[in-house]
Image: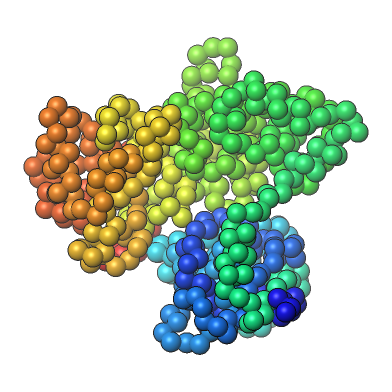
Amino acid sequence: MNLFEDTNPRALKDLLAEIHNRSAVLPDFQRDFVWEPGATQELIVSIANNYPAGSILRVRDAKRVFAAREFEGAPPLAGAKHTFLVLDGQQRMTSLYQAFYGVGEHRYFLNMKKLIAGVDFEEAIFHVRATTKWAKAHEEFSLQAEDGVLPLSVLRGGAGGFGQWSRKVARQLPNQERIALEDALDVIEQKWIQVIDDYHFPVVTLSDKTEPDALCTIFETLNRTGVKLSVFELLTARFWPQNIKLRDLWDKARQDHPIIEEFEVDPYYILQAIALASRKAPSCKRSDVLNLSPADINNWWQRVVDGLSLALSILRDDCKVVLPKWLPYQTMLPTLAAVMAKGGSPKSAEAGAQREKIKRWFWCAVFGQSYESSPNSQSAKDVTEVLAWFNNGSEPEVVKGLSFDPKSLRDVTPRQRAIYRGVICLILGSGTGARDFHTQAVITGKLMNEEGIDDHHVFPANYLEVKAGIALSRHRDCILNRTLIDRTTNQMISDRAPSDYLKEIRNTPGFPFDAVLTSHCLPVGKASPYWTNDYHAFLAWRQDRLWQEIMRVTGLSVADDLEEDSQST
């Protein structure tokens, strides 16, 4: 029996249409969609450049052996008869479906003014949370036209949607301007839009004769294998003839600076930092890294490695990024390494002043989500501006241009990694430091690993859904309802009401209950909303408390009004 029905390429727009009409679905045992919006954006950039983005594996599901469910964001199955079960490609297909169909927690846009000006596609694409006022307002065509932003959802059916949108935009201008804009948009269509429209994924379709045990084996194999390809390996080969052994340099860097190993730093970031530090006009795009010279490596490798080690120490010790999983953006590391290599750590009290500036820049970049889009361009900009700031220049745009609406914390879940992880680090560093609910020791990276401390719900998710009627998962999972809880305590909590499990902890003789809760930026006292299980009052209290912490580290003093008022359930 031939296991394969066919191995033909399929157009992206057709694959997404199959998801939308529920012809293609997922086995119910597949894990949930977990991709962060930055990963979705990177995938779209690859597609716009016509780069390979992996293959899709599916089976013609005639036997209906496994329970099925729709892709996240797609219309409910509701009895619809599907044709294919997708076994490999769920995360990619879900992310693309949500981006091109305008569903999910984020909306994706193209800045047409930037594309017309000739910048790379990577610099022109961006995303915003769907709950923001900006996203809601830009559902209106008039604002899209005024600001020159194209919702990616316009392209859901292919290039035809772009043609209609662009003609509608151009018609609003006088004749001469209209013709010029039409010509410019035609160039964009040929260079980028048509490539997306024509993009095909290699698709392997298994026969409907495939046995269930074979499907289980295939799925298990897919989920335990896979090797990440590294640009660093390509550069290692490129520099070998010049007697520059990057692998040996990298091994020595990790040996001399264990913190680099502890933070699981990608060695490619070292090379990006060298590109930033070695050029008069900093730049760290792939082409810049590939064009590094032997002299660049020899002159800057050690300084960049030392600078990275110092920067990581500041993040760990001062900003309480105690484990790599809580670093908001790995892509900030080239910036930090280059800045510290070029201007950091003078032999005077100025080193302390620089440290304070690095900390403030870090927090502003995190809560401004500056590295969410176009991190390479942001790095180049920040290296120049932070170094000037070191020399008594003006504050970087990341710092002085920061705006933040604390209402957004109600919608920040683990998928909004920068703010989510940033808040966890703020909690770790608030007051005298967050304390373990089990041992009441100050939480460190070492203690996290030893005690199984991780981010968990304060009001248990199941309790909120079943007992409190909080239907939307993002309202149950938001950062306001999260803190760092050890494995033992979390098992004790289970799905109990806060008034129940907290009473048990409070009644433990000698346990400093109020001090431990306060260390997590949680309310205490008889009026605490825990004792009445008032989730909405709890969210309001903690939003205000965490906003105080955000103002403390960023220097902000006024909240912006950027968020749509969300329903509490």
Residue 462 in picture, x, y percent from top left:
27, 60
Taking the view exactly as shown, the residue that stands out farthest to the top is: 348
Query: Residue 133, relative to residue 415: is it above or below?
Result: below
Q: Quadrant of residue 177?
A: bottom right
48 or 242, which is in the foreground?
242
Residue 59 in picture, x, y percent from top left:
62, 76
Taking the view exactly as shown, the residue that stands out farthest to the left is: 526
Q: Residue at x 23, y 41 (%)?
A: 522
Indicate left or right for 68 with 568 as reference.
right
Q: Residue at x 43, y 31 (%)?
A: 445
Query: Residue 173, relative to residue 550: is it above or below?
Result: below
Residue 40 in picture, x, y percent from top left:
58, 60
Q: Residue at x 53, y 47 (%)?
A: 370
Indicate left or right for 314 with 471 as reference.
right
58 or 166, which is in the foreground?
58
Residue 534 in picture, x, y percent from top left:
16, 55
Indicate left or right for 518 with 392 as reference.
left
Q: Residue at x 11, y 36 (%)?
A: 507
The quarter of the image holding the C terminus is: bottom left
Query: Residue 564, relative to residue 66: is it above or below?
Result: above
Q: Is residue 230 visible?
A: yes
220 or 515, which is in the foreground?
220
The quarter of the image holding the N terminus is: bottom right
Q: How many marks?
A: 0
Indicate left or right for 165 with 462 as reference.
right
Taking the view exactly as shown, the residue that stands out farthest to the right is: 241
Q: Quadrant of residue 548?
A: top left
Q: Is residue 92 visible?
A: no
